Every structure is written in C-alpha cells, then in structure tokens.
Image (tube, coloured by chain):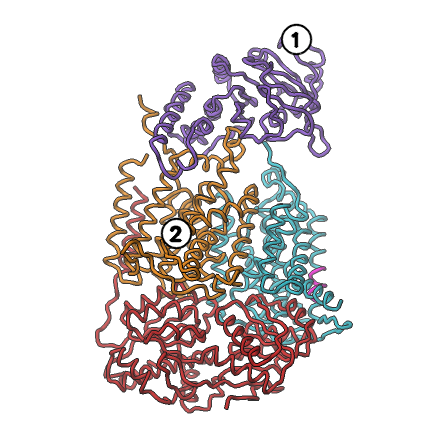
Amino acid sequence: MKRWSLVGLLAVVVALLFTVSVFAADVIKIGVQAPITGKFASEGQSIDKAVRLVVEQVNKKGGLLGKKIVVITCDDEGKAVKAAICARKLVNDGVIAVIGSYTSTCTEAAEPIYYRAGVLQTSDGTSDTLVKHGYWTFFRNSSPNSSEAKFTAEFFLKKQHYKRIAAISDYSTFSVNLTTAVVKDLKKMGGNVVYTGKIVSGSQNFTPILTKIKSYHPDVIYFGGYYTDGGLIRAQMVQLGMKADFVGGDSNDNPEFIKLAGKAAVGAYLIDVPLPEMLPYPAAKKFLKAYRAKYHENPASIWTLFNVDGLRVILYAIQKTKSLDTKKIAHYLHYELKNFPGITGPISFAPNGERIGSAYMAYIIGPDLKYHIVYREK
Amino acid sequence: MEIFLQQLVNGLTIGSIYALVALGYTMVYGVLKLINFAHGDLVALSAYIGLVILMQLAGVLSPALLILITFISTMVITAIGGIVLERAAYRPLRRAPRLSAVVSALGASMVIENGIMLIWGPMPKIYPASVVPNINFDLHGVYISLMQILVLVISLVLMVALYLFVNRTKLGTAMRACAIDQDAARLMGIDVDKVIVTTFVIGSALGAVGGLFIGMYYRGITFNMGWIYGLNAFVAAIIGGIGNIPGAMLGGMLLGIFNAFISGYISSSWSMALTYVLLIIIMIFRPTGILGERVAEKV
Amino acid sequence: MALLELDNVTKIFGGLVAVDSLSISIEKGMIYGIIGPNGAGKTTVFNCITGVYKPEKGKIIFKGKDITGLSPHKIANMGITRTFQTIRLFGEMSVAENIMSGRHSKSRQKWWHGIIHTPFYYKDEKENWLKVREYMELFGLTHLARMTAGSQPYGIQRKIEMARALATEPELLILDEPAAGLNDKERLELLETIRKIRGMGITILLIEHNMDLVMNITEYISVLNFGKKIAEGKPEEIQNNPVVIEAYLGKEDEDEF
Amino acid sequence: MMNTKNALYYGIFFLVLTVLPFFLTSNWISVMTTFLIYSVVSLSQDIVLGRAGMFDMGHAIFFGLGAYSTAILNMVYGWPIVATIPVAIILPIIASILLAAPIIHLRGDYLLVTTIGFNIVFTQALKNNVFGITGGPNGIFGVEPLKIFSITFASQKSIYFLALFILLLTLAIIHNLETSKPGRALHYLNLDSLASECIGINTRFYRLYAFALSAAIAGLAGVVFTLQFSAVSPGAFNFIQSVLFFTIVLVGGPSSIPGVLLGTFFMFVVPEMFRQFAEARYLVFGVAMILIMIWRPKGIWPVKFGRIPNYITKE
C-alpha cells in the first residue's frame, strides 16, 4: 500500500530527528529560552545575540574553568505551551543555566521544569509572581512590577501632583499586572484615578478610547503597555488636541517610541530603568560597543542588557565557586554575591531570587528628542 | 456633542481603511466564493513596499509627486502580488473542494506574513513623520487632520470609481456575471480567468491604498498586522453582505463607527468582543448581511 | 378517505404564483400522475407536499393529518418519500450506504449508539443491513454494493435513488420525472419496477414528461399549466381533452414529447 | 466492522505509541503528549467539520472550556481533579448546544465566520477575567495533578499515558460513531442536506448532536491539557488555535481517522522538529500547506467510504 510507505518514510524522518545529537563532553552548556519568532521576535533575537556575544568573549579568553561554553537556543515563540516544551528540551540538552524567557508568561510556564531539574534560570520577567513559588533556581535580573508601580505612583503624586489620572493597559500579562499595580498604589496614596481601560495591542486606532478619556478631562494618561502602541497613543492624543500629559511604563522605553510619535513625542514622560546608552557604568559602555561592532545595530531594548547581566553573574558565580553544581552556584548568588558591577547597575539577590534595589527613573522627552531625567528614587 | 462628532470622525477614518480592505475580500468572494485569508497579509506587504519606495524617493521628488508615485507604484506592485497569489495558491484549486482552497489561503497568509518578517525583520517599521504635512484642523473642539481628510476623500473617490467600473463597463458587467454563475458566464463567452485576475488586481490595488493609509496615518507597521486588519475588514465585508460591493463600503464605515462608539460609550475592554457579538447577531438574523440578497437553494 | 389530499394549495415566489389554489386527492394504492408543460409548477407541488416549501395558502392532508408546513424529515417519517428530478445521491458513498440511508427512520438506534454499541445495536444494525440487501437484490444492485454511487451510470443512479426511497418503506412514493434521461430499455425496466412497487401496496405520485409512460401506467392524471389545474381524469380522457392539447401544442416545445 | 488488516495496523500504531516514551527525551515526551491531546481535539473537530461538514472555526472554545473548567474548579473552588472531569465534559456540551442552535442553519462560510466570532468573544472574556475566576491574561497556574485512589499522575510519562488512553477512548467512540445510525446520518446530511431531510433525517438534531459530541471530547482533551501544563492561559485557546485544528483536519483528510492523525503530526510535530530553522520554518510550512492542497485536495489520507458488512453482498 502506497500510503503505508508514506508512513514509513515519516517514521524514518522522526527517528532521525529524535536522535539526540552528540555533544562534546567537556563544555559548559548555557540555554537561551526566548521568543525568536512571533510578536516579541525582535526582543528574543536580541537576547540571543547578546548572550552569544558574551559567551564568545569568554571563550576567547579561554573559557570558564578551562571549558568552552556552548549556547543552546530554544524558540518559545512567546507562547506558554512552547515554553514548557523548550524548558524540557534545554534540560535534556544538559544546560546548567537558562537565560530567559523574555515574557513573564513564558518564564512562569518554564520555572517549575527548571526547578525540578535543578537548572538555574534568570529572566527579565517583571511579573511579581515569578519569585513567589519558592524555587531556588530562579533569579530575576530586572526589577519587578511592584517596585516600578510604587515609583510611578510617587512620581505622579509627589512630583507631578496630578489631580485626575487615566490609566490604560493592553491585554498582556505584563501590562495588566503593571497597570493594576500602578492604579492600586495610586489609590493607596490618595490619588484620583478617573478612568481605567484596556486596548488591544496592535490595533493602531486608539482615537475612540482617547476621545472617551478626553471627556473625563484627565491631566495625565498613564499607559502600561508596549511602545508599539504607546507611541501611537501619544501621537493620537496630540492629534485629538488633548492637553493631558502622557506617562509611559517601562516597555514604552524604546527608540521606536519617538519615531512612532514623531513630534508628538516631545513632552511625553517615560518611566524605566536607564536606557542602554544612558547607563553610566563602564561595563555598559564596553558591552554596547562590542554589540554594535558585531551586529551593526543596538540591542532591542534595556531588557537585553538585564538578561546579559543575569548571564554575567551566573558565569561569575561559576568562576568564584569553581563548581558546576547549581546548588552551590545558587547559594553563592543568594548569599555571597554583593554589588556585582553589572551593566544595569550593582547586582545582589534576595534569598527568594529577587534582584535587590531598583534603578527606576522618570524621563521627559525634550524638544531635542532626547531623554532628560526629571525624577529618580533617592 | 464634540465627543460624539469626534468619535464619528475617528470611526469614519478607520472605517474607510476597513472598507478599502473589505472590498478585496468581497470581490474575491463574489467571483470565487473563497475567503481570501491572505488578503490582509497582502495589505501588510503593501505597507512595507510603500515604505521602501517612499524612502528611496524621499528628497528626490516634490512632496505631492512623491505621494502620487508612491501610491501608484505600490498599487501596481501589490496588484502583481495579487496575481501571483491567485496563480500559485488558488488557480490550481479552482476545481477542488471548497475547503482545500481555504487551507491554501491560510497557507498563503503564513507565507506572506513570515516572508515579511524574514525580509524586514520582526521590529515594527515606521513611516516618516510628515509625508503628508501635519496639519490639524480644530472645528470647535472636533479635531481632524489633513491626513484624515485625505483618507476619507481618496477612499470615497476610489469607491465611487469602483462602483462605476463594475456597473458601467463591459469588464465590470462580466465580473457581475461571473459572480452570479461562473459556468453560465463561461458559456456566454466571458473569459472567466481574465475576470478573476482582474478581481485580484483591483482588490489588491485597493488593499494597497489601505496599507499605505495605515502606514501614513498610523505610522507604525508590523509584519503581523495583516491579521488584525484583515479580520476586521473581513467582518466588515460580511456585515455589508459578502460578495456585495456597496455592502463592503457600508460595512467598513459602519464597523469603524461602531467600534468607535463602543469604545467611546460602553467599554474599550469589550469593544473587540462586542464587534463580534454584533457580527454574530447579524449572522443569526440576517446571514446575508445588510445589503446581501437571500439566495434560495434550487431543488 | 383519500391518502393524500391537497386543498387549495397556493405557493408564491416573490410576485410569481407558482401553484395556484390547487386541489387534488389521491386514493390509496393508485398511481397518480401530474403532467404539464415546463414551468407549470409541478415540482413546486412536490416540494410543498414534502415540506421543502411551505405553501402560503391551503392545506395538505396525509392520512387525515394536516402536514402543511411540517419539516421534510417529519413528513418523511410519516410515510412520504420522494426522488428528485436531478438525482440527489450521496455521491461519494457506496451504493449500499446510499440505500442504508433510507433505513434511517426505520432503524431504532438511539443517539447513544453512536458512542457505545449495545447488544441491541448489533441486532438493529444487522436487521437494517439485511433490508438493504433485499432492496439491492430487488433492483439488481447487489454486485455494485461497494462501488461509489456517484460514479455509476445515470440509469443505475436512478435505480439507487428509487431503492433508497423504497428502503424507507413509504406509504406514498413521489417520483419526480423518473424516466428523464433513460433509454428505451431502461424505461421499460422502470415501468416494471413501478408496477412492482405498486404491487407492494405503495401509492405512487409521479411527474413525467414522457407521455407514453404516463398514459401507460397512471390511473389518474392532473394537468397543470401556470400553476393551475386545467384538467383531470383518466389517461384516455386527458389524451383527448382539447384544453390539454392546446396547453401542450400551443407551445412549440417539440422535444418535450 | 473493522477488518483484520486495519485492526493489525491500529495494533502496531498503539504498540509504537506505548513503547515510544521509553526511547524519548523528556522534551519529546512533552511534544508527543501534546500531539496526543491535539489529535483528540482534531478528531473531535473532524466530527463537526469532516463528518457533518460544518465549517466550525471556533473549536478551541470547547477545548478551552474543558481546560478552564478543571483549572477553575480545582484552583478557585478546591475540587479534586477527578470531580472536575464530568463538569469539563458537560459544560462544553451545554455551551456547544447553546452556541450552535441559533447558527446551525447557516451556510458554510457564514457558519465559519460566526464561529470565529464566538472564539474571539470567548478569549476576550477569558482575558477580561469574567466573574473574577479566569485569571485574566495570565491564566491560572499551579493546577494539582490528577489523583485516582492512591495513584498520582504527576510524572511526564504518566500524563503521556493518560493522553494515550484518552486518544484510545476517542478512537473507540469515533469507530462506534462511524458504524452507527447517527454517524452515517452525519455523512448523509453533509453530502446532501435536502436529500437527507427527505428520507427522514432530522438534520438539525444531528448537526447539534455532532457539535455536542465533539465538544464533549474536546472538553475531555482540555482536562488532560491542563494536567500536562498544570496551567491554562487564554492564548492556548484563541482563534489562531482553532485555525490550527481546522487546518489539521483538512490537511490530513476529513472523516479519515488516519488522515487526521497524520494531519496533527504534520501540523504540530513536524514544526517542532525543525526548530533549528526557527525563522524560516513557518514560511516553508505555508508553502507546504498550499502544495499539499494542490496535490491532494482531499487531504494526505483521504477518507474511503464503503464501510459495509460482508454478509450483505454474499449469500
């Protein structure tokens, strides 16, 4: 039967692909779990490139503990289902640590798998729940939503003294969590939130919701989503003749925001840890230079750099402990590592894997289309 | 009152874009009875092509000429894309079961979307700020920009032109004949292949105008935006009565306005869901859409 | 009491009156013919009887029950089955499966038998397949049981459709131009078959263009023109009725005969 | 009425699936578990799409309802997983009947559009955290494993075998369906709805029947899906996912069990194999979909009718 020969052929293909590729034994394997395709592809690809760059630098200097480092990348497409599959793949491939993923959803889906396998994981995910499972394998390399939310509320009420606040989010886990936290903190501090709403990311036409918000006469609109939408929201606000301020959450911090909003970008506020090029630390300048030299572009965003820091502390801990035992490395990171000079600032971890301290700042985009710091945490 | 009028302006702007894209769906459906799932992605592609042309010619030509040339060349290139699409993915399946063509359309959609990502990358691309001078009119608190006026006027002109083409020319009449009964049309000596190609050419060219508007008005374009615009435009075509050209125009405008009013007066969180609730209600009570005709099955 | 009675049935499409207050009455056991030129509304009458269309006015009474406007499957389950002018078989399925479809209403399987097979299922399934075998034998289709219905020649397809209709064990069988497209030999076979069916005690209502066949086989005829009944009577009366002759010959539609 | 040859093939198929996990690495077990679950969903989609011929492009709703029922009852109301299973089957049935009843009479493409609409409303509702129990865009994490008596289905292999069991069950049901009066009725009304009515088939009833049965199976698959990831999120049940199930059936071969299984393999497992070509693989995939439809418009493994008992042709 012809059909069964087809099945036979498929079976052979499967068999070939299932065969685990043979690796040289004497290497240290580092995994990257990131959205290489899909909606967040630009961020994922940037993380992958940056990790490979760091590893290349280390290998050039003779590797770590005398071993070469090998990077294995798995594309989770920004989807939870694929994230779980990726996590298992990387565990099987024998990685000792994984960088990623970019989104909180994918990070959370993969966490228990790495935990059970004793594989270290470091992610830039900002969802507060990431550190709440009590997994010793997990290290956040950025700051959680809660600290950004707190900073935002302070900026709104103590610095800007806004009286009527409107808040918008999109439907992503990250954005909903951040915006909810901001609204909650604002209310806790006595702020007057007159409107909250959601937009569909990528729908581009935000004039209807903005026109509605206009009727509430807010003096500020907070947007806790991504720059692709934030830039357009800002532009359309101006086009509708709205006088309210615009304050964007961290994911609006992207050079494209200014390109999207055009002249309307002037006067918009953004809240984030510093931009890659604004980082004052020498390590940051060096890294950016190397990245540009190799890839002829800038990293997609600050999130790439957070992940690079995650990778760098893990490599540092391996060197310090002279061990590939993840328990020992984790112990070192939790209790001994203090103020490691990271690209994104000094790094230390709390026992739950949370990065200590936050470096949030508020910027205004000036007429020169550059960022100017207007407020920072003491 | 300003709020109401402003929402109307908001709705009409996006509605014109939906209408332009919806025409592509409805024309192809009329002639081939096929949901051309790749149409939205073709629109996205046109926005990228337009951007490339714009960047190549910027500074070389005067602004008005630049816009004109960009529009014409993008329309031509997208139309060629439409022809290729028809040749490669639909023509070989003309006699196959209907659903095979649907799968082929979905496949084509994947090809175009991922093709765009491979060529231009996953990052959004951004149109230069003032292709059309950034002039904003304030009419007693209702704001309308020059670009919005252009979108409305050009869309209207194109739609009237299309209406006249379909109803007043020989090729247009042939197109309507094919929509009613392809086999009979063929027997009457109509070159059905030519009609189908024409349909794709016109649909894609109008979609290209929609794509350029998206780029010039909303500025940011992404490789996967075809889905969201395609789906909305498709819904617009259905609401108007799929296969019916004035229906698609009406459906697009109505959908734009409906969207604006839902976000404006009910809840933006549910605006997308409510759009589809409207669609479902129309499907239940008037499945052939607002302007579509009821077709009885011949026994 | 008549088996089927149409009382002033009127069906309108848009502005066009397709059937105009038609009254006919069919006795049990007879072979009844409806004739008339093209577009006279014959098929529309059938569609009204079988529930495909709902008439605007009038009543359709079957075995003393008002069946006007009931859905087709209910009417079919009451004992009226039809064939179609353009054959409507389940073309991709086998001949046996096509005939089995006729057993649908007689099979007593319930919905859960599609999920779990009980001993009753096996019994019922076997009974019905054996019935299918009977009807295949009756029409000489047994050797084609596994063949695809849609790829059979026209004459065979007519037989399959008739076998499917009979498999429902109807009381009234409605045949919509059963001889259309058949050659002389097949037509003779058809005559035989129709008589055989009547022999089984089934009443037959048929539309036919072929005058020979109609005159040969029917016992009573109604003639329709423009939706109206213009004449009725025994075949020999109709043959000589001047109104009928005018209705037919007034049109230059030679190949109708 | 399965002949011995087919029985043999199915035997081999299941033998391979049974021993497979002992040779696979755990990520491939994970892929294969999802493959089994998606096969069940696709087979259920096939009841509506392939057999009854209704263009349902919102099947992820029923899959999602099953998954969410289990997750919500377990996490919000503290039910044990076993107790959630009946709800995860019955709720999709009710939903399918309520949703399908008003639209069942629609012609092909109109039904397709309406079901897309339902699916979008469904995911939007999940994301908007309706009744405060769906967990919003995050979904729900940390669902407990299934416990039957003292056996806990927590390991990957145990969930694989659970999924395999569900697939077996589904195949048994579909085999029963296709050799019974209701199953044949679906084919009849698909091929010619009017002719079916005229021989006494209540097409409306059987269309709803197809929806209800397929929703029940999809709901059950949803339970296993929740168990595999111990989590649910709206993205796994959005309209794109429905498009996947729809495509699986058509690429594989509507109404054909081996076809649908092959379709699931081709549309889900094959892309996993080509992960290394991350960026280009979906492009190639789109081309493959077009080519398959051109070369085999009725699917890779088209259905063959003629499932009739031997005794009716013999003496």
**Subunit of label 1:** C
Q: In this view, does D50 lie to the left or right of A332?
A: right
The answer to whether residue D37 is seen in the rendering is yes
Q: Is residue B239 above or below residue A186?
A: above
Front-most of residues A172 and D226 = D226
Q: In which image quadrant can residue A265 be found?
A: bottom right
On the image, the x and y values in percent for residue B290 come to: 67, 49
On the image, the x and y values in percent for residue B160 come to: 72, 56
The boundaries of the magenta stretch are B150-156
Residue at the disc numbered 2? D85
Q: Distance between the residues labelled 2 and 1?
A: 72 Å
Chain red in the figure, letter = A
Q: Colour of chain D?
A: orange
The answer to whether residue D218 is seen in the rendering is no
Q: In which quarter of the image is the N terminus of chain D?
A: top left
Total marks shown come to: 2
Q: Is residue B151 left or right of residue B108?
A: right
Chain cyan in the figure, letter = B
Mark 2 vs mark 1: tell me if same chain: no
Give the number of the disc on residue C237.
1
On the image, the x and y values in percent for residue C180 come to: 55, 22
Q: Chain C is drawn in which colour?
A: purple
Element carrying mark 1: helix
